[in-house]
Image (cartoon, rainbow, N blue to C red):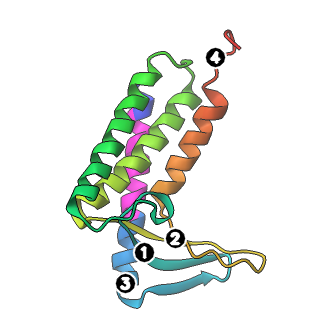
Amino acid sequence: MRLVAISALIALLLDQVSKYAVVHGMELARVRAIDVLPPLLNFRYGENRGINFGLMDGDGDLARWVLVVLALLICCAVLWWLRGAPQRPIVFVSAGLLIGGALGNVVDRVFYGYVLDFLNMSCCGIRNPFVFNVGDIFIFAGAIGLVFFAQDKKRA
């Protein structure tokens, strides 16, 4: 479980440092858009009050706190699930990344009322209108890691 905590802490810190550096340090909140490697990578300011891609976007305080509690419950459920998961380092790191990314978004919701998003990627003539953050990358990577590496080969 120590590996879970270390991975979660690293993911949480990288998420929060990246948000601070880009949104506040590079003043993305003021300028709204910075082209980094267009069209592949751009910084676009976003405030996500919902879930992924703005689903369940609610401006009310109730929605904010429901999403905070839901994220914390999911983190607890992942920790509970780990008790019976294969005891491999990659499984613990994956769980830690998922938890750390989720906690990064929880920190945003608590302090700002929304999740700060700033990454935008487009390619091949297709313009992506959505933005995400480093925490979202960790959530995705952690979930994929759990899907692929948390299978009990004895039971399979």
Disc number for residue 46: 1
Kind of residue at badge 3 = Glu
Tell me which numbered mark, 1 or 4, is placed earlier along the sequence: 1
User: Is 16 within the magenta?
Assistant: yes
Asked if disc 1 and disc 2 are in contact, CB closer than 8 Å, the reply is yes
Position of the N terminus by quadrant: top left
| Residue at mark 4 | 152
| Residue at mark 3 | 27
Q: Residues within 10 Å of mark 1 (few under 14, many from 20)?
A: many
> Residue 71, located in which quarter of the rendered image?
top left
Kind of residue at badge 2 = Val
> Residue 54, located in which quarter of the rendered image?
bottom left
Kind of residue at badge 1 = Gly
Asked if disc 3 and disc 2 are in contact, CB closer than 8 Å, the reply is no
Position of the C terminus by quadrant: top right
Q: Residue furthest right?
A: 124
> How far, Cα to Cα, is label 3 from label 1?
13 Å
Give the label, 3 or 2, closer to the camera.
2
Tell me which numbered mark, 3 or 2, is placed earlier along the sequence: 3
Give the label, 3 or 1, closer to the camera.
1
Tell me which numbered mark, 1 or 2, is placed earlier along the sequence: 1
Q: Which residues are magenta?
A: 5-17
Badge 3 marks a residue whose secondary structure is loop
- Tell me residue 150's x, y (percent): 60, 26
> How far, Cα to Cα, is label 4 from label 2?
35 Å
